[in-house]
Image (cartoon, rainbow, N blue to C red):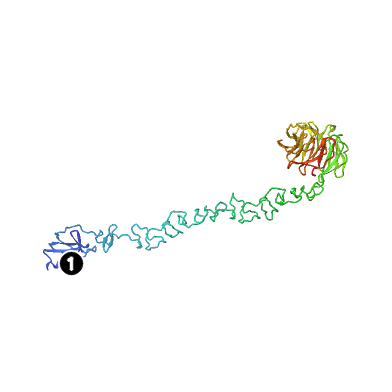
Amino acid sequence: MKIRIGSTPILVTPLLLTLALAGCGDDATGSTSDTETSTSEDGTTTTGSMTTTGSMTTAGPDPSGTETMGMTGATTSGSTSTGPICEPGMANCVCDGGTCDGDLVCENDVCVDPPDPECGNGVVEGDEECDDGNAENTDDCLDTCVNASCGDGYVGPGEACDDGNDIDDDGCTNACAAITCGDGEVQDDEQCDDGNDDNTDDCLDTCMAASCGDTYVQAGIEECDDGNAENTDDCLDTCVAASCGDAFVQEGVEECDDGNDLDTDDCVAGCVAATCGDGFVQEGVEQCDDNNQMADDGCSDSCQYEERQIYLTSSNGTEGFYEYDITSDTWATMPNPPQTTRTQITNDGALVYLMGSNNTIYSFDPETDQWANVMAGPGNMTSSPIGFFQWFSDGFYYLKDGQSTMWVYRDGAWSSFPVDVAGSSAGTWDMENNELYIRTWFEMGFQVIDTNTDTIVRTITDATNVGENSRTGSYYGGNFYARTFTGPMQRLDAQDGSKTDTGAQPISGHTGTDTDFTTGKIYISGYSGDGTVFQVYDPSDDSITSLADSANVSNHSSITVLRPPM
């Protein structure tokens, strides 16, 4: 039983009560005066005098379970003061049925302040997030009673790593994931990391930078990538597809590959080894190559020149017909034509044609050395003066010197059409482009006629005076070559007429010329004072070479070089 003396509750036990009563004598009634010393639960000692008046009875147990003592007419006086009764459940009071007010806890049946939280006791207390009662930091609860999380520095459940910082490229990501190729972050020994598995961009799925030789074709950069350094397969070690001209011989595909586009060396177009008959003249090995290995066509089956001829006569009505052998550099006298001529002579590669001054066309066969009558000319105009006469694949062209009417024989009949300016007796048919070149009368300029349509396609004006005793005017390789009476050879661009002085000076004045379409050289016949001089001009180096002297025709020499057979 507790009683309160002043403000301090006193626990009154049965023994203490008995002793108190004993001090009062046998009579339980009356007044008693005594001095009592007591000690409270907190260890404080209270001394004072108590005067009890009246009667005291002892009641039975309190239904609440708390032992009480009834007091009737009790008064207290002394050095202590009276205070409120200690209510159950309050601080430092008995527990109220095992419970206490607020945050108080019941210990030894007294309500006291709760103890401070203790992390690690297995009980979540105070501001603890968790308390699993252990010091393990790899589970869900740290030893600081905080929930495990990424960035706490401990590798917990579901984490591959935890370095306790927010640096994303130091070996452990901010999601506590271990370094992996493809996570989009370049880390450690990775050269790149684009976060995808595409091996055609600049970063492979191994996080290595794309490079030639990695076996993956980098889009827009590489043509191929076979992962090796072999240059005889279809992909070079530069990751470029093998091709003719790359200087590497592709095994099973190419015969050779010299890395250039020259067709005069031992490896020609298509990376094929040069051979006689391939159409390309192998320098220092072949004299000619007519794209076949047939004999008796001007170029032998060993790609050497066969006997080829040039024919010479006067175009001023004088007899005499001569043959020059190019291979042997010799001249021979041939049978005279049935009629002398006042025009150029021409050929189709097999026969030589001469327009007789009697308006009849004759042919000469070099195989039989025989002349034959071919057909009539374009009318009674082929006598004096001189004229232009050219064979082409459909027939013949004829123009009287100094006139502006061109006659053409095609489809079995002669017809005519006007030209821009009067023409001379010098010119060439360009078989490759089907164009006819004719020098302007008394000038160095020229006209070009489309032999498919008989129309003038261009006229090049150059008023340099060229006397009509000169039959010089020949086309080859995009240029027209002409000269004055005694001047050097002039090269005129066939398209725009721009002129270059070649410096190549023929010996004879008043020369006649014709093109050798086998070699690209231009042969030059002379007459007048140096009529026996015969020369060849090479446009490739602007050189002139003197050959065996020709027969001395009386005037106006005309030559024709046999064309390659069609």
Residue for point 81% across, 49% down: 295
Q: Where is residue 321 in the image (x, y as percent from the top left)?
A: 86, 39
**In-image side of 445 versus 135 (left or right):** right
- Please tell me which residue lies in front, 499 or 295: 499
**In-image side of 251 versus 39 (left or right):** right
- The type of residue carrying mark 1 is Leu
Q: What is the count of numbered marks?
A: 1
- Please tell me which residue lies in front, 460 or 111: 460
In the displayed structure, would residue 68 be above or below residue 207?
below
Q: Where is residue 243 in the image (x, y as percent from the top left)?
A: 66, 51
For the N terminus, the quadrant is: bottom left
In the displayed structure, would residue 361 be above or below residue 13?
above
Residue that lies at the very extreme toward the left in this rendered image:
30
Using a 10 Å C-alpha cutoff, classify the residue at mark 1 as few (fewer than 14 neighbours), some (14 to 19) or many (20 or more).
few
Q: Position of residue 523 (x, y in %)?
A: 79, 40
Quadrant of residue 75 within the rendered picture: bottom left
Is residue 345 visible to us here? no
Give the labeled residue for mark 1.
16
Quadrant of residue 143 within the rendered picture: bottom left
Quadrant of residue 350 within the rendered picture: top right
Is residue 113 visible to us here? yes
**In-image side of 231 versus 163 (left or right):** right
Residue for point 12% across, 64% down: 34
- Please tell me which residue lies in front, 345 or 156: 345
For the C terminus, the quadrant is: top right
- Please tell me which residue lies in front, 416 or 119: 416
**In-image side of 159 versus 253 (left or right):** left
SS class, disc 1: helix
Q: Position of residue 447 (x, y in %)?
A: 75, 34
